[in-house]
Image (cartoon, grey):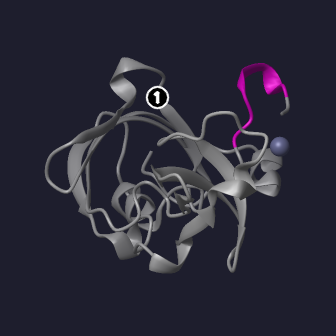
């Protein structure tokens, strides 16, 4: 069957960004399973998968507007080092949740000086052109319950 709204799709993928760096490779782990047509995946990927079937392999290039969006400078903030009181060693790459003008978002520390800490609330793939290679492993119809919930249920009907 072809992938359409309310298909449950299992696929493997490799993701590189901006024409180079490999970011994710599901072939080394578990394939991704999702319910098609409910906005579970980025828009460009759901569009690319529409109408495909088991065994299909393809590559697709997705621009930021159909991927993880553009980067927003407003999500990059300088915070006084003093506000990290209680955190022993603030270092690059540490993750926190922070209040921003866009609500509470996960942020990553991108720079640390004696006085200030720079945190970035952008999605790591914001602004990137995404280069996916996809292989479709399984396509089935969703159950009525899965459609109602808007997500896939595991084998044996176990729930959440
Ligand atoms: Zn459910």
Q: Which residue is at the front of the view, 153 or 74?
A: 74
Q: Quadrant of the C terminus?
A: top right
Q: Which residue is at the front of the view, 128 or 111?
A: 111
- Location of residue 1 (image quadrant): top left
- In the rendering, at what x and y percent does residue 107 appear? 59, 55
Crowd tier of the residue under label 1, counting other residues whose Cα lies within 10 Å: few below 14, some 14–19, many 20 or above: some
- In the rendering, at what x and y percent does residue 105 appear? 67, 62
Residue 78 on the magenta span: no
Q: Is residue 50 left or right of residue 109?
A: left
- In the rendering, at what x and y percent does residue 12 appear? 38, 33
- At 41% from the left and 72% from the top, the residue drawn is 71
Callout count: 1
Q: Which residue is at the front of the view, 115 or 129?
A: 115
The boundaries of the magenta stretch are 152-158
* Residue tagged 1: 31
- Location of residue 45 (image quadrant): bottom left
Q: Is residue 129 left or right of residue 126?
A: left
- Location of residue 18 (image quadrant): bottom left
- At 74% from the left and 35% from the top, the residue drawn is 153
- At 52% from the left and 52% from the top, the residue drawn is 114
Secondary element at image label 1: loop
Q: Quadrant of ligand 1?
A: top right
77 is higher (above) or lower (below) than 142: below
89 is higher (above) or lower (below) than 147: above
Which residue is the extreme one toward the left?
19
Residue 31 visible, this orientation? yes
Residue 135 visible, this orientation? no
- At 73% from the left and 57% from the top, the residue drawn is 83
Q: Which residue is at the front of the view, 8 or 67?
A: 67
- In the rendering, at what x and y percent does residue 2 appear? 42, 50
């Amino acid at each position: 069957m072809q992938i359409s709204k309310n298909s449950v799709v299992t696929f493997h993928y490799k993701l590189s960004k901006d024409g180079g760096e490999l970011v994710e490779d599901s072939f080394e782990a578990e394939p991704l399973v999702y319910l098609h047509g409910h906005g579970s995946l980025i828009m460009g990927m759901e569009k690319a998968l529409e109408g495909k079937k088991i065994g299909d392999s393809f590559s697709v290039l997705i621009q930021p507007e159909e991927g993880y969006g553009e980067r927003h400078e407003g999500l990059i903030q300088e915070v006084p080092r003093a506000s990290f009181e209680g955190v022993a060693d603030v270092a690059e790459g540490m993750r926190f949740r922070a209040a921003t003008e866009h609500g509470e978002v996960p942020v990553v520390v991108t720079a640390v000086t004696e006085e200030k800490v720079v945190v970035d609330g952008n999605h790591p793939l914001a602004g990137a052109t995404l280069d996916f290679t996809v292989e479709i492993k399984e396509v089935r119809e969703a159950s009525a319950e899965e459609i109602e919930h808007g997500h896939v249920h595991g084998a044996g009907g176990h729930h959440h």
